[in-house]
Image (tube, rainbow, N blue to C red):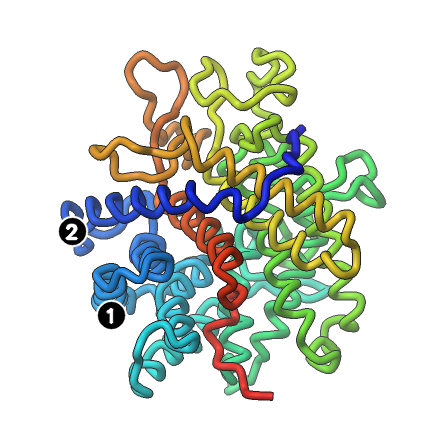
Amino acid sequence: MIQINENLSTESLSQDLLHFWKLSGQKINAIASTFDPKQGAPVFTHGFQFGSALLQFDATNDLDFLDLGRKQTVDYMAPHVSHDGVHDHGFNNLSTYGNLLRLANEGKIPASDWESHFYTLALKISGAVQASRWTTIPEGGYIYSFNGPHSLFVDTIRSCRILVVSHLLGHRYHSEGDAKISLLDRALHHIKSTAKYSVYYGEGRDRYDLWGRTAHESIFNVNDGQFRCPNSQQGYTGFSTWTRGLAWAMLGFSEELEVLNELPSAAFSSVLEKEQMIALMLKAAQATCDFYITHTPSCGIPYWDTGAPNLYQLGNYLDHPADPYNDWEPVDSSAAAIGAQGLLRLGHFLKVSNPIEAKRYWQAGLTVLNTLLSAPYLSEDKQHQGILLHSIYHQPNGWDHVPKGQKIACNESSMWGDYHMRELALYVQKIINKEPYYRFDNCILKKEE
């Protein structure tokens, strides 16, 4: 279980964050100087790479990173806007076009009306393309994964942001026969399906299971839309918890709560009453965050799956800091970076309605961040292009590098892990600097009251 440090504050991390951004800039430049984007994006997405430069600019005001991120977005991101074969639009396009439009709306970068329209159009279309990957089930539906219409991934909860943004920008999805489909309705249905089928609560159908456990994949019969079973792609089994999937749920539910809670009740009426929908999302957010706190080692960094077959070899591993150099099972620092932001956002959301629980989640998030900002997770090697060490991509497929002399994968980075580490650091830095609270809908220009 995470040993929550009650003495940490955002301000106490200020110097570590300054050091982090200095290293981060070096890493971004190292990749930009050696990697040709025309070669494609092996094992990471362009959105995370190019979006990282934009986050670096936001944190440091270094215009070179703005120029880099903006040029890369314009030159290389268009195929990602129209890509109908993935469930990742909320990652790729909000990380690039979304960040650029947010920076313009916040007054941090100059942007002509036409430049803002360009980013806006990309986000509108991205939301509609993402919504087209749809499987209908009796109680609604879900955005299906790259595995096919039978497959609901827990990851996609974070991609739902693009549907919400596209809707709030005034867009909708036009389908066969010119059917006009609400992007918000599709987002709400997907969120509801994820909360019901991807998250377990130890009650009802899942009374045998644990509060807050998640399954990476949920399988449906596409003939009648009935749920069949849990499964996993990157985790150990459908009956254990792949911790990065858990982290996606923690962050996805928490950030959607922040935005959707401010919409009028009428916006929810075709799916659920607003009070029911918010309660459903809050339950899922708290359950997953509670599971993370309880089933993660004391330092806040999880192993790649809570049911990994050789964890027993590590003894009482939850009572000690995680060991990325052990001989049995890898840790996944990228899950920690994603999950920490979920903990912080949930804590922020609850600070008025439930201040005791809010503080617990908030301090847990700071505890995880504090661990990530130092060795052995922060990469200070100038020859290494990653910023966050000990990220795992696909343990079952054996796609992660095992260094010479080690028995398990370790000591490497991933582009999504680095991006989310930067996003976590930026989230906290903006609070320290008393800047506008960082939310995904900041890319939408708010009307003056």
- Above or below 348: residue 26: above
Relative to residue 73, is residue 105 drawn left or right? right
The residue that mark 1 highlights is 74
Which residue: 66% across, 38% down? 6
Cα separation, mark 2 vs mark 1, equals 15 Å
Element type where label 1 sits in the image: helix
Tell me where residue 270 sits by quadrant.
bottom right
- Which residue is tagged 2? 36
Left or right: 293 in relation to 75: right
Marks 1 and 2: in contact by CB < 8 Å? no
First in residue order: circle 2 vs circle 1: 2
Residue at x 66%, y 53% (from the top left corner):
346
Report whether residue 154 is seen.
no
- Quarter of the rendering occupied by the C terminus: bottom right
Q: Amino acid at mark 2?
A: Asp
Q: Position of residue 127 (x, y in %)?
A: 47, 72
Asked if 253 appears above or below 296 in the picture, the reply is: below
Residue at horizontal 79 percent and vertical 60 percent from the top: 353
Residue situated in front as seen by the camera: 148 or 80: 80
As helix, strand or loop, the secondary structure at mark 2 comes to loop
What residue type is disc 1 on?
A: Val
Side (left or right) of 39 relative to 229: left
Seen in the picture, residue 162 relative to 237 is either above or below; the reply is below
